[in-house]
Image (cartoon, rainbow, N blue to C red):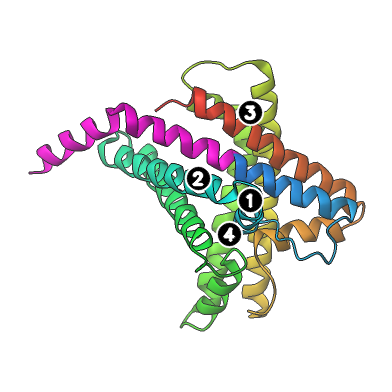
Amino acid sequence: MTTSAHGSASRAAQHPAFRKGARLGYAANGLVNVVIGWIALQLAVGAASGGGQDASASGALRTLADQPFGQVLLWLALAGFVLLGLFSLVAAFIGGETKDRAKDAAKGVVYLALAATTLGIVTGTGSGGDGTSGMTATLLQQPLGRILVGLVGLAIVAVGLYQAHKGWTKKFLQDLRERPPSWVVIAGRAGYVARGVAFVVLGGLLVSAATASDSAQEQGLDAALQTFRQAPYGQVLLGAVALGFIAYGVYSFARAKYARL
């Protein structure tokens, strides 16, 4: 039975439509990151201060929804996220090394969560924010909640450090089937480092919330980017991180073509 399921999963993973759908997911992720970067860039120059724009994945998706053909873009993004999420889970099921299977499984969960967020926005049933603050408040109310939130924060810090290292050392090239043009390498390097730094700050906010047991403190990606803005030379720092998110989006567009599937 297991062998049969493994064979079916392998055949599904090799189906051209499934693979093209997974590549669409990378392109959709690129679009989301470009919009996050654009919102953060507006925050850096003060254009969006007080404007209610949310520099997070859900905020970017809501911004897309308000654009011409926004609903079409969101439905395409939804399809891409679902297919890439499922493709990643299938890859985890049929994969080889444990660390690769764990990475594919985690990626699958992330993209399916993005799909759920997209579905909520495109159908009008999604809530505001990126869900991090709500999750933190819920966890803090549980037994050992502060410890759980602290561990989640430390895990996000670890992810951020890994992404920054992956970008700086150009290990992301291992995810591609061939070496892309130099501009893709530059975009990927800047993008991974910028996202890594942002996630380190996000994880730090969660650890801070756990230490203070303060569920009212904002802990999402938007709050992490706002932290840059409030730091010395904050506009410059936030502008650099914003350009990094845009660069990561550009890299993701290229990854849709060059990804090793």
Q: Which amino acid does label 4 sit on?
A: Leu
Magenta residues: mostly which secondary structure? helix
Tell me whether the residue at label 1 lies in contact with that at label 3, contact meaning CB atoms closer than 8 angstroms: no
Amino acid beneath label 2: Ala
- Provide the residue designation for mark 4: 154
**Image point (54%, 28%), residue name:** 255
Indicate which disc residue 119 carries.
none
Q: Which of marks 4 and 2 is nearer the N terminus?
A: 2
Query: Could you tell me if the residues under marks 2 and 1 are in contact, i.e. CB atoms within 8 Å?
Result: yes
Mark 1 or mark 3: whose residue is earlier in sequence: 1
- Callout 1: 10 Å neighbours few (<14), some, many (20+)? some
Secondary structure at badge 3 equals loop
Callout 4–callout 2 Cβ contact below 8 Å: no
> Considering the numbered disc 1 on the image, is that residue within a helix, a strand or a loop?
helix
Q: What quarter of the picture does the C terminus occupy?
A: top left
Provide the secondary structure element on which disc 4 rests.
Answer: helix
Tell me the residue that label 1 is attached to: 64
- Name the residue beneath numbered marker 3: 169
Q: Give the range drawn in magenta.
A: 1-30
Indicate whether 249 appears above or below 136. above
Q: How far apart are marks 4 and 3 (CA)?
A: 22 Å
